């Protein structure tokens, strides 16, 4: 098993769960600023060993999801800002450049202190 990247949840904005009904969670590094933290799950800056790719696995607080598609800017913004949008919809083609799509399953419970990691 190869660890691609790992981070930890450090906080949640008041609106971080506003998009759960749309099967979306927005991640942002803990230095997001500009009001973005209000709508984000705040994380430590991830250490990324390589780009995430379809077929890799997302482990979100012990719940696993297979990556189905990834936008062309998702890894760049994840490395620089700790930002990506996780879309739990199983789409095979990205709808936006910063989105990581994973298989359609119930969203995980979001808890401060939980680990988020990608591996293969």
Image: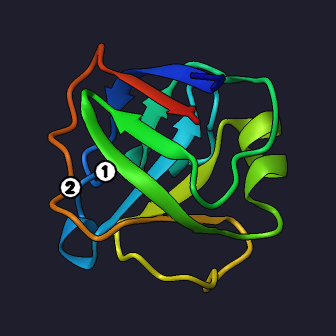
Q: Secondary structure at mark 1?
A: loop
Q: Secondary structure at mark 2?
A: loop
Front position among marks 1 and 2: 2
Whether residue 113 sits left or right of residue 44 in the image: it is left
Whether residue 68 sits left or right of residue 5 in the image: it is left
Marks 1 and 2, the one that precedes in the sequence = 1
Q: Is residue 85 above or below residue 14?
A: below
Please state which of residues 47 and 28 is positioned toward the viewer in this rendering.
Answer: 47
Q: Which label is found at residue 107? A: 2
Q: Which label is found at residue 37? A: none
**In this view, which residue lies farthest toward the top?**
113
| Image position, residue 5 (x, y; %) | 64, 26
Please state which of residues 104 and 43 is positioned toward the viewer in this rendering.
Answer: 104
Q: Residues within 10 Å of mark 2 (few under 14, many from 20)?
A: some
* Quadrant of image for the N terminus: top right
Q: Residue at x 57, y 47 (%)?
A: 56
Q: Residue at x 63, y 61 (%)?
A: 54
| Image position, residue 21 (x, y; %) | 18, 74
**In this view, which residue lies farthest toward the front?**
1
User: For mark 1, what is the residue?
Assistant: 16
| Image position, residue 6 (x, y; %) | 56, 21
Q: Residue at x 31, y 42 (%)?
A: 64
| Image position, residue 79 (x, y; %) | 79, 36
Determine the CA span between mark 1 and mark 2.
Answer: 13 Å
Q: Residue at x 84, y 49 (%)?
A: 76
């Amino acid at each position: 098993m190869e660890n691609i990247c790992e981070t930890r949840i450090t906080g949640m904005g008041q609106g971080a769960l506003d998009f759960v009904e749309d099967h979306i969670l927005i991640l942002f590094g803990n230095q997001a600023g500009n009001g973005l933290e209000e709508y984000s799950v705040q994380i430590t800056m991830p250490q990324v060993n390589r780009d995430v790719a379809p077929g890799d696995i997302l482990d979100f607080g012990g719940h696993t999801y297979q990556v189905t598609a990834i936008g062309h800017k998702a890894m760049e913004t994840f490395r620089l800002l700790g930002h990506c949008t996780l879309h739990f919809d199983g789409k095979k083609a990205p709808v936006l450049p910063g989105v990581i799509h994973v298989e359609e399953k119930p969203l995980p419970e979001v808890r401060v202190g939980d680990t988020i990691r990608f591996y293969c």
